[in-house]
Structure formats: structure tokens, C-alpha cells
Amino acid sequence: EDGQGNSFSPSFTVKNGRRYRYYVVRDAMDYPGRKRQAPTRWPAKELEDVVLGRIHSFLLSPNELFDAYGNKDTTGHIGDWLTAARSLAERWPRLSPAEIQEFVNSCIAKILVNQGIVEVWLNQAAVSRRLTPSAPANTEALLPQTENAVLRLRVEAKLQRRGGELCLLLPTPGDQDKVRSRPNPCLVKAVVRAFRWSELLLQADAGNYASLAAKHGVGDRYFARVLPFAFLAPDIVESILEGTQPPSLTFAKMAQQIPLSWIEQRKRFGFPAFSRD
């Protein structure tokens, strides 16, 4: 839910044959015209990755685990319990979707999302019981006194629109926001088409721009805007294909003008200078 207590429901849209999943405030679905201060739609896959990633980092952190459970240990076996937590953390990337879903259903009490912050509420007792099968029986002493006790795990995450899509930006150790690695379909398509079309133009029987554009079912203007993508610096091409380009970079921005100089390309589009320039 959001900071105002509004619940979210899963939803999706289809654009250009591709399905995009979201979590949408239920009230916003019923009253779409109402103005709101907080975001009403969050990208589902990225939000799920943020939540699961935060739980994983919690299980890997002895300090966080000790802060959550250490003062409840009256048996001196907190070390065994921490070992069990780390064992689960090491297996976490290999868990099946069904195992992840079971953990989510049993251990997550609530997820709060606001602009800038995602907060995961874990049921302390449920997490303890989830780990107990791998730990000594006397670690039951670490269970909280109330079933309603929660652990609040926070992670900074901002919403930003990138190339027509909603994306989550996460902080880096250097306090610089970065978008989670996710290719921008419009940019990827432009790069792939540009390299293919440039190869065709070199063939003796390729014809001119107009004939090639017609052959591929696109307009002359679009063809001319896409072709310069074939002359991007290799590191820029790699970044686009991996989805690590600057979050504000869009097809429209790049297609306005692509300099021939790779150095100028990096300056114009916000990429770091290449060491061998």
C-alpha cells in the first residue's frame, strides 16, 4: 500500500505487442481523473526485484540480523541462528519461484511504497520459524513475544519515466542514482535496425533510402533518423543493449542529432569519457 493507506492491485498494459505489468492503486483505477500527490502506478517486475533484493541483503547482514534478534537470545545460540540465515541467503538466488512465493506469503506482512522509499515489513515470528528448521531447536527463544512484531526494511527507490516506461532508480555507494539494468526497447530496436540497414545499403542491389524503407515497412523519415545509430561508439552500443544507458536518454533525444565524433557522442548523451579517446 502507499503512505495514505491505499492498496495496490496487479494490472498490465500491452504496447506494441509487449506486456507490461504494474501495481496500481485500486482507488485510482476506480477514479482515474482524481488528482493525487503520490505515485499510483509502479512497475511490477522492478518493484518485486527491489523487495526480494532487500530481503536478501537483510539475510546476508549479520549486523541487521543481530539488531533484530540478538537482544532476544537468552540461550547463547544467536551464532547458530545467524548461520542458518546466511545459508538461506546463499541459496536465495537458486530458489524456485514457488519457494520464493512461499517465503513472501508467509513472511511479508506489508509493503509500503512512496516516492523515494520502499519499505518491506517482515513478520519477525514468521522469519524466525522459516529459519528454525535449519537451526537448533533452542533458537525458538529468539522468537518475538508477539505474532504482530515486524521488521521494517527500507530501501531508497525513485520512480522515473524513461523512454515512455516507468523505471526505478536506486542509490549507488557514491550517492548517484542509477536505473536498474533494463534495456530500452526503442533504443535497442534502433541500434539493431541501424546496423542491419547500413549493411544492406552497402550491397550493390540495395537501392536507395526510399526503397529500403518501403521494403521494411517504415517511412523515409524514420529510416533516416535510425541509420546514424549504426555509427555510435561501441561502448554506447553496449550500454544500450545492456540497458545501462543514462535513464533520461530516449530515442527522440538521440535521433535529433548523432555527432560523428565518438567523443562528442558521449558528451551529448551523458556517457563517461572513454579512457582511450
Image (cartoon, helix red, strand yellow):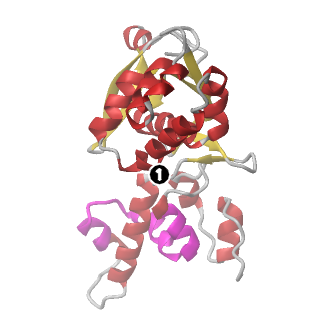
Q: Is residue 15 above or below residue 144?
A: below
- The extreme bottom residue here reads 204
Query: Quadrant of residue 65 in the image?
Result: top right
Q: Where residue 63 appears, x then y in whole percent?
A: 67, 37
Q: Residues within 10 Å of mark 1 (few under 14, many from 20)?
A: some
User: Looking at the magenta stretch, what is its main secondary structure?
Assistant: helix
Q: Nearer the viewer, residue 139 or 115?
A: 139
Q: Which corner quadrant of the image does residue 26 belong to? A: top left
Which residues are the magenta region?
A: 211-240
In front of the other: 243 or 256: 243
Could you tell me residue 235's position as x and y percent? 57, 72
Residue located 24% across and 68% down the image = 215
Q: Position of residue 194 (x, y in %)?
A: 41, 71
Residue type, mark 1 in image: Arg
Is residue 129 shown in magenta? no
Residue shown at 47% from the left, 40% from the top: 84
Residue in the foreground of this view, choosing between 138 and 219: 138
Q: Is residue 234 magenta?
A: yes
Q: Quadrant of the C terminus?
A: bottom right
- In screen coordinates, is 106 left or right of 115? left
Report if residue 155 is visible in the image: no
Which residue is located at x 52 percent, y 76 percent?
231
Residue 225 rendering spot, x and y as whole percentages? 47, 63
| 141 lies left or right of 198 | right
> Mark 1 = which residue?
182
